[in-house]
Amino acid sequence: MMGGLLQGKRVIVTGGANPRGIGAAIVTRFLDEGALVAVLDQAYPDGAQPALAGGRVDLHCDISDAASCEAAVGRAVQALGGLDVLVNNAGIVAATRLAELSEDEFRRMIDVNLTGTYRVTRAALPALRASKRQPAIVNLGSTAALRGGGLLGGSHYAASKGGVISFTKGLARELGPMGIRANCVAPGIIETDMTLGKFGEDWERELKQGIPLQRFGLPAEVAQAALFLASDLSSYSTGTVVDVNGGFHIH
């Protein structure tokens, strides 16, 4: 697309392999807006350095492993020729209640969702600092962080995403003087593999009735918010959290 909102910008998106997920929707929208995108996901095979094809390159990355993050980000920056935007989307979810929640499961949730975001961001920082095109970080939080979990996310999930939101605000304060913006998208109930068919017909109907817009969100709608925060349209926004929840949580 000529003149797209991200024309020529070099982007890393983590967790974009699932075609029905939020990450894939972000990748698709960013490509439509003219970006060059490196998609980092543990589902992709490890090994040789692939080349850009159709504006994207798919690279193996396990965000729970620091060495994997460093290597994947390095390969992405090499393939893209630099880096202007980082989208930390990869994560996991579970609704385990506290009484059944093991310490290992708690640690795993924090390690993937929060520490994984830190690992990739830290690896990407030198390339972002070198960018001359209004570099930006977009992190994926969750409405669960704002309302204390519930539904498909337990307290440990809420804590991990609450940490992502606080981490984002800290990044905004620290990296702003370097010209790097950092913002967060907090999705509500979105129609992905994580939610579809998980509630049952009656409960799903009841949930939708409790949402002012009377429906669940679409991955493409989360991608639109990410696009705004990644693009120069939000050039004076940093440290913000954009809710995409249909009014499910109003605060």
Image (tube, rainbow, N blue to C red):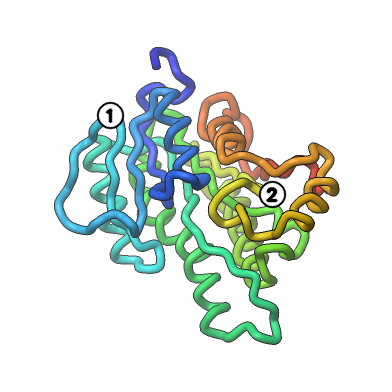
- Nearest to the observer: residue 118 or residue 249: 249
In the displayed structure, would residue 194 be above or below residue 76?
A: below
Q: Residues within 10 Å of mark 1 (few under 14, many from 20)?
A: few
Q: Residue at x 69, y 78 (%)?
A: 97
Q: Residues within 10 Å of mark 2 (few under 14, many from 20)?
A: many
Quarter of the rendering containing residue 155 = bottom right
Q: Secondary structure at mark 1?
A: loop
Q: Residue at x 80, y 40 (%)?
A: 214
Assess whether mark 1 and mark 2 are in contact (beta carbons under 8 angstroms).
no
- Quadrant position of the N terminus in the picture: top left
Helix, strand or loop for disc 2: loop
User: Residue 12, position in %: x, y?
Assistant: 38, 43
Q: Position of residue 221 (x, y in %)?
A: 61, 35
Please state the horizontal and vertical placement of residue 102, each as a whole percent of the image. 58, 86
Of callouts 2 and 1, which one flags the residue occurring earlier in the amino acid sequence? 1
Residue in the picture at 22% in, 42% down: 78
Amino acid under disc 2: Gly
> Residue under circle 2?
188
Q: What residue type is disc 1 on? A: Gly
- Of 187 and 234, which appears nearest the observer? 187
Left or right of 135 in this view: 103 = right
Q: Read off the residue under disc 1.
A: 54
